[in-house]
Image (cartoon, rainbow, N blue to C red):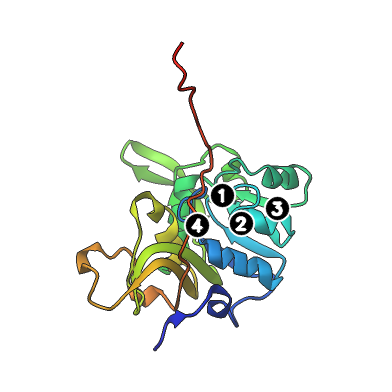
């Protein structure tokens, strides 16, 4: 089966529809599936729910889809520096389900493993626990309350990788791995955009982060521009 597609639009053909849940990898601007997110925006689909750590920044990543009002809900752990995300949330224009960062990653991982729910101490006694089932379990420090969190089962996963072979075995680059692996596994269909595509057998089997069984479609997105979320400079003039 050929998994390689010529461009992001073709790779997403037949997968997009209004109202779907999309799991998107990335953290800030690190490891975000830029080409795929652009193609989702250009498709015109709307009323989308995104499960992602955050929404990038204004006019980058999911931030572009916020600008075009294609996102109905964000399941995220961080608003970040996205002013439009903040504005829409405070104005009641965007539904937001805030989720602790580790819990969000585990909800994606659980979905990828077919686990519908799990109990965690994170968020007990806070707003995070409102409306959720609470049970007492014997933990390492004795009996304690735990809240039930639901696994995320996304209609589509879009992720960004460093390298992949044509069968979908995928390698991420250092911290760009972030949410990409759990996001990839929780999607019913996973589309990966890569910087470099190689032949099967070219990758060290012990270095593969995402096995090809999770990947249905691949597109090469290179070349990329290195975007910087915060540019910090110092005065080099010495008095």
Q: Position of residue 142 (x, y in %)?
A: 34, 37
Query: How far is the residue under mark 4 from the one under mark 1?
Result: 10 Å
Q: Please tell me which of labels 2 and 3 falls first in the chain.
A: 2
Q: Please tell me which of labels 3 and 1 falls first in the chain.
A: 1
Q: Which residue is mark 2?
A: 62
Q: Position of residue 127 (x, y in %)?
A: 61, 40
Side of 159 relative to 41 (left or right): left
Q: Disc number at residue 54?
A: 1
Residue neighbourhood size for the residue with mark 4, other residues' Cα within 10 Å, grouped as few (<14), some (14–19), many (≥20): many
Q: Can residue 111 be spotted in the picture? A: no
Side of 92 relative to 211 (left or right): right
User: Looking at this view, is 71 or 130 the one in front?
Assistant: 71
The outermost residue toward the bottom is 1
Residue depth check, mark 2 versus mark 3: number of the one nearer the observer: 2
Q: Please tell me which of labels 2 and 1 falls first in the chain.
A: 1
Residue neighbourhood size for the residue with mark 1, other residues' Cα within 10 Å, grouped as few (<14), some (14–19), many (≥20): many
Residue depth check, mark 2 versus mark 1: number of the one nearer the observer: 2
**Residues tagged 3 and 4 counted as in contact (Cβ below 8 A):** no
The residue drawn where x is 73% and y is 52% is: 94
Query: How far is the residue under mark 2 from the one under mark 1?
Result: 8 Å
Q: Position of residue 137 (x, y in %)?
A: 39, 46
Q: In the rendered image of this protein, does residue 239 appear above or below residue 202?
A: above
Query: How far is the residue under mark 3 from the one under mark 1?
Result: 13 Å
**Residues tagged 4 and 2 counted as in contact (Cβ below 8 A):** yes
Query: How far is the residue under mark 3 from the one under mark 4?
Result: 22 Å
Q: In the rendered image of this protein, does residue 171 appear above or below residue 93?
A: below
Residue neighbourhood size for the residue with mark 2, other residues' Cα within 10 Å, grouped as few (<14), some (14–19), many (≥20): many
Q: Disc number at residue 32?
A: 4
Query: How far is the residue under mark 4 from the one under mark 2?
Result: 9 Å
Q: Which residue is mark 3?
A: 95
Q: Can residue 59 be spotted in the picture? A: yes
């Amino acid at each position: 089966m050929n998994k390689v597609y010529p461009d992001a639009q073709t790779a997403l053909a037949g997968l997009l529809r209004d109202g779907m849940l999309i799991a998107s990898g990335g953290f800030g601007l690190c490891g975000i599936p830029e080409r795929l997110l652009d193609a989702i925006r250009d498709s015109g689909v709307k009323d989308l729910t995104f499960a992602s750590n955050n929404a990038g920044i204004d006019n980058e990543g999911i931030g572009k889809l916020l600008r075009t009002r294609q996102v109905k809900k964000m399941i995220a752990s961080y608003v970040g520096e996205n002013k439009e995300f903040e504005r829409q949330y405070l104005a009641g224009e965007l539904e937001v389900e805030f989720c602790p960062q580790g819990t969000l990653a585990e909800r994606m991982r659980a979905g990828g493993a077919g686990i519908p729910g799990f109990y965690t101490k994170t968020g007990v006694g806070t707003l995070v626990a409102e409306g959720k089932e609470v049970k007492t379990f014997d933990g390492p420090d004795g009996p304690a309350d735990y809240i039930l969190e639901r696994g995320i089962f996304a209609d589509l996963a879009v992720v960004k990788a460093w390298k992949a072979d044509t069968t979908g075995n995928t390698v991420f680059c250092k911290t760009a791995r972030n949410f990409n692996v759990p996001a990839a596994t929780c999607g019913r269909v996973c589309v990966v955009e890569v910087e470099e595509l190689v032949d099967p057998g070219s990758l060290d089997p012990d270095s593969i982060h995402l096995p090809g069984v999770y990947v249905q479609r691949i597109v090469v997105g290179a070349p990329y521009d290195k975007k910087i979320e915060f540019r910090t400079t110092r005065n080099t003039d010495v008095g």
